[in-house]
Amino acid sequence: MEDAARRGDGRIALVCLDPHRHRPKALGRVLHAVSDLVLATPDLEVVLPAGRDSALRAMAEDMLGRLVRVHVTDGLAQPDLLGLLAVACAAVSDPGPLVEQAAALGVPTLLLSGQRGTWSEPEHAGAPWTAGPDRAVVARIAEKLVLTGPRTPAEVLGDGRAAVRCEQAVEWLLGLSERPAEFVC
């Protein structure tokens, strides 16, 4: 599946949910939205990691188990999760590090946050859309993100030069070099 996405022969959406953040009814609405998304986009595969004995897994298998393009997997180790995120065309997630990682990789993201029926567009490039656990809203925004595809990665995790700046600062503190230029974000 990941190889097919890398070759452009299919698309993957990653759905990461924390069942403790949602009441069962709200979780059910989100899972129904995932079903709607899969049915609306014939070339999309959805990966939903869930612990083997979790309530999320039981609900996901019950509600999505008949859809051949939905893969409910065991929880993923961070390197595997990031590898999957790197080839994903979109992600749906609760608040957490995955949202920042998705932005840094240029993966459009829907952040599940807020009250049912609420939603908002990103305030700036790289920021996620947000929506409450509402079936129609989540399905529609997720479909929009899947169809939009990758975007320019955001610099939410910095510009990649922090180590160089630290090295310059230490050299200056030890008297080995001139004072480095001030850094302003």
Image: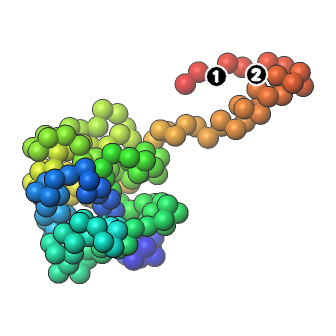
Query: Residue 167: x, y in percent?
Result: 77, 33
Is residue 10 among what the camera can see?
no
Query: Residue 116: x, y in percent?
Result: 11, 44
Q: Quadrant of the N terminus?
A: bottom left
* Residue drawn at (46%, 76%) of the image: 3
* Residue drawn at (20%, 52%) of the image: 22
Instruction: Classify residue 177 as left or right of residue 117.
Output: right
Instruction: Classify residue 100 as left or right of residue 42.
Output: right
Q: Amino acid at mark 1?
A: Phe
Q: Which mark is residue 183?
A: 1
CB of mark 1 within 8 Å of CB of mark 2?
yes
Residue farthest along the front direction in this orientation: 53
Is residue 142 among what the camera can see?
yes
* Residue drawn at (19%, 44%) of the image: 131
In what element is the residue under mark 1? loop
Q: Quadrant of the C terminus?
A: top right
Q: Amino acid at mark 2?
A: Pro
* Residue drawn at (45%, 63%) of the image: 81
11 shown above or below 20: below
In what element is the residue under mark 2? loop
Residue 168, picture quadrant: top right
Circle 2 is placed at which residue position? 180
